[in-house]
Image: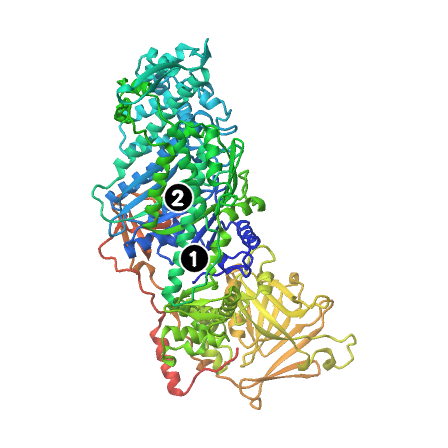
């Protein structure tokens, strides 16, 4: 676990919560959501809160590279982390994997599934064959979304069908094919979309963005407002969806998947037929009969279907009823009243669209399936979420049933995985109470169950009221069922795990039967239009007097769900629980009530409890040791501790005072930590340890990084005093590093250097001793009392930046007791007039300021004054273009007053009685005397090494040549054409280079380029070159016994 746990109020893993409660879970999710952190873990389970906006940088190619090949817990929670873990487990274990995405409509399931597909596509192989497979897989999404998604009050792009996408891989992890399974298309939406909602996207795309030729051929020139199936909801446009752009992407997707133009036009013809069928109106006739009101609309439908208009009218306004079976079977044609005719019309429209959708899925599978496939796969389940509407019918019962089954398998597999891990590690298993919804799954789909009773009612001719009576008799008041189902009048209530739902029983039987009348099937089979045969109408067999009835919708759906559950149990599951933060699709808004409801029905609280199972955190011995061994001195060196990995983990825990069996337990390969607070203690300890280590590392790195720069500075500083001043031994050979106080990392100093809005570059920082010299008011008093003695020196800090020279000190603010910076002067470099120094080996210097600086001249003592004066000279030269006057003399007169001229003489005396490497500060009358000990004479000082600049034109560089054209898919990727040559800057491994082309720098996929012959890899950094004469002088100096000491 290399990532930080983060703020305790915004933890990235809910298992780490100190107190597990629904309220704390919601609070944590909200705190993260407000920081645009939409992903959170519950152990291996990913929670995704829909942001209803694009988060900058969240899904770029750079983000994919960041998560590629990382351990699941190594980086902050992300859908790419789960996708990478799924992909790697499949490759490493050669086992089938599945990603189960759940949540209600509008929670972001479809977008999440597309992100997983995109990630897997990005990290898998890049050969032309593999790329073709990936393009086809990705192209299936626009087709399925266009024909199966719609705008609802909850979601602008809601999936109105269930989808299980299986991606097939070879042993090397390259996709070789795929397979799509669809579940229960919401056909009721076709004939009656809810208020403020839209029908399926394809209807608006075709009527708005179809070509003029297509519109004329299918009579669609009037727009979506002209069709009853689209106009009744009065919603034609959706914010964020461009129907014209979607139509272009749809055509491209059809082309990629190999649809011919004739097949495409047959698809559009079927869509137009459905729209025109909805415009057929009926008028009531005598004796409960009906007839078509507008025969022109009927003729259009008949023309598009390729059938006789009279036969079409008869199929809609009459119905053939069969009495008896076998030899006694007899057919009677019965007239339909207006309502029955409208029902027949809508049934035909739904049947045509359902056949079209199934054919599209079949056609996609033909294009992407791999015959004779033998390998592993990743399944991605994107299925409708739990639904509670004002009016709930058969479709909602089926949708909520599959969500009950998914919740059941989630709890079952999560518990199973936890129990297996505890048994595998030899840790006592702690039984956790949780809500088991298996009885409810049996109530709906079992034998007997609500759907089974519905099938019986359909097969025996019972009404919906009689079916509700059967439910009451079978379940209400029965032992073990409690009040899980309550029948009241023509409604029944089921207490789902996600909440109570009231279903209206009327229409359940008709929707469950959902069979076409025989004469309608015969009508369709009489058509000579190619799409009729393509979409399987001719495969339907109508048997006269058959005893075996066709399977009901409910029975088929239960069979599909059972197969799905079997497929999911055969895979290693990965879970994503999607949450909708508010009902109005507003970004940056999380409504507590809305989220609390979803947290409850997704079972997140139970999930956290199961995951904790008494232990908040578990990790492998290897990873725990790698992260926390620095806390235990015994483990700093392997030679000092000889023991197993378990003993090493125990040593770390014992060192910080933990007791085995209370704060932690050791399994066979993992350590288990009981409380989240204990883990936070570990993190606090390691944070402190690493902060102190970081300072040491930063110092060493800065020294390494700036070695050449400071060697150059040292030589230039030497040139300022060369031949003009005696030196102390330590000042000659010491290393220069500029910032001796680490002020670059001091927040007070950083704030001081950024007050102007632009951060100044710190060049030098050190302590200094400033003599505060005052003139007397009376000229006749002794000069001695006019200036300060040694015990009156002020200790300050002197800082040089690329713009200013500072003198300041840290003081305590009396009112608040805060440490603040008191600045004594801040002078622009250009307003420094000169610097005066003696010719002896002392630490004093006088800085003279120009009048506009408003600062009197200052007598400073600084141990590293040679470096300071040298850097000051270099900076002055850069800013003004002129050399800074630096004078060397042993007597200087300086003014000590701002108001009027008060002069003091400063004299330096070479004194052999003074201890080496020191000086004495004395005042005699009007004169300040500085007694300096003898130093190394100027002509005997050995110059420091002089560094020469590296000839960059001779550096070895590696070039890359493009093998294919590549269009960068992100702002940090280079675009290039075949044959382009670029300079490789870095080999990033895992299939990427960093390169430069035409002054642009970016990432390059390794599969698209080759290294040119002669590229020798990255060039080695050369050590600074030292002139030969300098080496000879150093050898002579050592021979004479010369050397270096310290000081200025």
Q: Which residue is mark 2?
A: 113
Q: Nearer the viewer, residue 630 or 742?
A: 630
Left or right side of 441 for 928: right
Q: Is residue 360 above or below residue 100?
A: above
Quadrant for the N terminus in the image:
bottom left
Q: Nearer the viewer, residue 410 or 968?
A: 410
| Element type where label 2 sits in the image | helix
Camera sees residue 12? no
Query: Along the polypeptide, which appears first: circle 2 or circle 1?
Result: 1
Q: Is residue 176 above or below residue 347?
A: below
Q: Nearer the viewer, residue 205 or 557?
A: 557
Q: Residue furthest bottom?
A: 913
- Residue 616's disc is none
Q: Position of residue 69 (x, y in %)?
A: 35, 56
Camera-near label (2 vs 1) is 2
Q: Position of residue 663 (x, y in %)?
A: 49, 70
Camera sees residue 521? yes
| Element type where label 1 sits in the image | loop
Q: Which residue is mark 1?
A: 75
Residue 428: quadrant of the picture: bottom left
Q: Position of residue 3 (x, y in %)?
A: 45, 60
Residue drawn at (44%, 47%), measured in percent from left and top?
A: 439
Q: CA distance from mark 2 to mark 1?
A: 21 Å
Q: Is residue 373 above or below residue 393?
A: below
Q: Residue furthest top?
A: 286
Q: Residues within 10 Å of mark 1 (few under 14, many from 20)?
A: some
Disc tally is 2
Q: Position of residue 528 (x, y in %)?
A: 26, 18
Q: Residues within 10 Å of mark 2 (few under 14, many from 20)?
A: many
């Amino acid at each position: 676990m290399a990532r930080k746990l983060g703020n305790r109020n915004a933890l990235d893993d809910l298992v780490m919560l100190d107190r597990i409660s629904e309220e704390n879970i919601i609070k944590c999710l909200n705190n993260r959501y407000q920081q645009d952190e939409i992903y959170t873990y519950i152990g291996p389970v990913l929670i995704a809160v829909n942001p209803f906006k694009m988060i900058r940088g969240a899904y770029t190619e750079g983000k994919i590279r960041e998560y590629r090949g990382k351990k699941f817990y190594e980086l902050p929670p992300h859908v790419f982390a789960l996708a990478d873990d799924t992909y790697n487990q499949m490759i490493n274990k050669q086992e089938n994997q599945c990603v189960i995405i759940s949540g209600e409509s509008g929670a972001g399931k479809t977008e999440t599934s597309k992100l997983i597909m995109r990630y897997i596509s990005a990290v898998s192989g890049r050969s032309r064959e593999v790329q073709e497979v990936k393009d086809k897989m990705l192209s299936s999404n626009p087709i399925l979304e266009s024909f199966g998604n719609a705008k609802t009050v909850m979601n602008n792009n809601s999936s109105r069908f269930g989808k299980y996408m299986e991606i097939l891989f070879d042993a090397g992890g390259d996709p070789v094919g795929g397979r799509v399974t669809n579940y229960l298309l919401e056909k009721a939406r076709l004939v009656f979309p809810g208020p403020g909602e839209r029908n399926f996207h394809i209807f608006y795309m075709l009527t708005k963005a179809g070509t003029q030729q297509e519109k004329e051929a299918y009579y669609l020139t009037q727009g979506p407002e002209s069709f009853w199936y689209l106009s009744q909801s009065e919603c034609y446009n959706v914010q964020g969806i461009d129907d014209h752009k979607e139509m272009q992407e749809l055509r491209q997707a059809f082309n990629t998947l190999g649809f011919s133009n004739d097949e495409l036009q047959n698809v559009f013809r079927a869509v137009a037929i459905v729209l025109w069928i909805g415009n057929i109106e009926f008028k009531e006739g005598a004796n409960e009969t009906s007839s078509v009101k507008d025969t022109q609309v009927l003729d259009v439908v008949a023309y598009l279907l390729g059938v006789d208009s009279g036969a079409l009218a008869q199929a809609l306004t009459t119905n053939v009823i069969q009495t008896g079976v076998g030899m006694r079977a007899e057919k009677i044609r019965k007239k339909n009243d207006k309502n029955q005719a409208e029902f027949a019309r809508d049934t035909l429209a739904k049947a045509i669209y359902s056949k079209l959708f199934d054919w599209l899925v079949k056609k996609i599978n033909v294009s992407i399936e791999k015959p004779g496939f033998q390998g592993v796969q990743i399944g991605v389940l994107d299925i409708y979420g739990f639904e509670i509407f004002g009016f709930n019918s058969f479709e909602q019962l089926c949708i909520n049933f599959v969500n009950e089954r998914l919740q059941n398998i989630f709890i079952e597999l999560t518990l199973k995985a936890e129990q297996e891990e505890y048994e595998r590690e030899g840790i006592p298993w702690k039984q956790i109470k949780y809500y088991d919804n298996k009885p409810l799954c049996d109530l709906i789909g079992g034998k007997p169950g609500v759907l089974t009773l519905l099938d019986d009612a359909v097969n025996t001719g019972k009404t919906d009221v009689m079916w509700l009576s059967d439910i009451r008799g079978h379940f209400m008041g029965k032992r073990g069922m409690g009040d899980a189902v309550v029948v009241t009048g023509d409604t029944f209530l089921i207490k789902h795990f996600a909440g109570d739902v009231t279903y209206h029983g009327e229409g359940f039987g008709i929707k469950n039967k959902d069979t076409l009348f025989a004469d309608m099937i015969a009508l369709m089979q009489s058509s000579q239009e190619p799409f009729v045969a393509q979409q399987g109408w001719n495969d339907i067999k109508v048997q006269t007097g058959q005893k075996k009835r066709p399977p009901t919708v409910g029975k088929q759906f239960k069979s599909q769900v059972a197969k799905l559950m079997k497929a999911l149990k055969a895979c290693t599951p990965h879970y994503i629980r999607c949450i909708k933060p508010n009902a109005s699709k507003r970004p940056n808004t999380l409504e507590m009530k809305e989220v609390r409801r979803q947290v409850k029905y997704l079972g997140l609280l139970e999930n956290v409890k199961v995951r904790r199972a008494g232990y908040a955190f578990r990790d492998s011995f290897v990873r725990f040791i790698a992260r926390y061994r620095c806390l235990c001195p015994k483990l700093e060196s392997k030679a000092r501790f000889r023991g197993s990995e378990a003993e090493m983990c125990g040593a770390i825990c014992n060192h910080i005072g933990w007791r085995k069996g209370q704060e932690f337990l050791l399994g066979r390969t993992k350590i288990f930590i009981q409380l989240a607070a204990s883990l936070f203690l570990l993190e606090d300890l390691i944070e402190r340890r690493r902060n102190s280590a970081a300072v040491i590392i930063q110092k060493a790195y800065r020294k390494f990084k700036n070695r050449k720069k400071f060697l150059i500075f040292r030589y230039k500083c030497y040139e300022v005093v060369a031949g003009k001043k005696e030196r102390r031994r330590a000042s000659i050979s010491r290393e220069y590093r500029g910032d001796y106080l680490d002020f670059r990392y001091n927040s007070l100093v950083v704030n001081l250097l950024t007050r102007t809005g632009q951060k100044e570059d710190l060049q030098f920082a050190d302590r200094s001793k400033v003599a505060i010299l005052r003139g007397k008011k009376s000229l006749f008093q002794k000069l001695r009392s006019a200036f300060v003695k040694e015990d009156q020196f002020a200790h300050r800090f002197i800082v040089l930046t690329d713009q200013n020279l500072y003198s300041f000190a840290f003081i305590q603010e009396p009112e608040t007791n805060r440490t603040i910076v008191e600045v004594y002067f801040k002078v622009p470099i250009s307003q420094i007039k000169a610097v005066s120094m003696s010719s002896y080996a002392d630490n004093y210097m006088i800085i003279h300021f120009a009048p506009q600086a408003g600062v009197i001249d200052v007598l400073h003592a600084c141990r590293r004054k040679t470096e300071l004066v040298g850097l000051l000279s270099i900076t002055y030269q850069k800013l003004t273009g002129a050399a800074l006057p630096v004078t060397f003399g042993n007597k200087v007169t300086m003014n000590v007053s701002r108001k009027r001229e008060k002069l003091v003489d400063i004299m330096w005396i070479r004194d052999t009685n003074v201890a080496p490497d020191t000086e004495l500060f004395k005042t005699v009358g009007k004169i300040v005397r500085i007694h300096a000990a003898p130093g190394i004479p100027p002509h005997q000082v050995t110059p420091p090494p002089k560094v020469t600049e590296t000839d960059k034109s001779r550096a070895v560089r590696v070039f890359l040549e493009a093998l294919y054209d590549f269009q960068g898919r992100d702002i940090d990727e280079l675009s290039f054409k075949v044959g382009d040559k670029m300079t490789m800057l870095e080999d990033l491994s895992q299939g990427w280079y960093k390169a430069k082309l035409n002054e642009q720098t970016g990432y390059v996929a390794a599969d698209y380029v080759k290294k040119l012959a002669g590229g020798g890899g990255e060039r080695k950094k050369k050590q600074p070159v030292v002139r030969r004469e300098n080496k000879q002088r150093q050898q002579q100096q050592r021979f004479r016994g010369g050397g270096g000491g310290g000081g200025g």
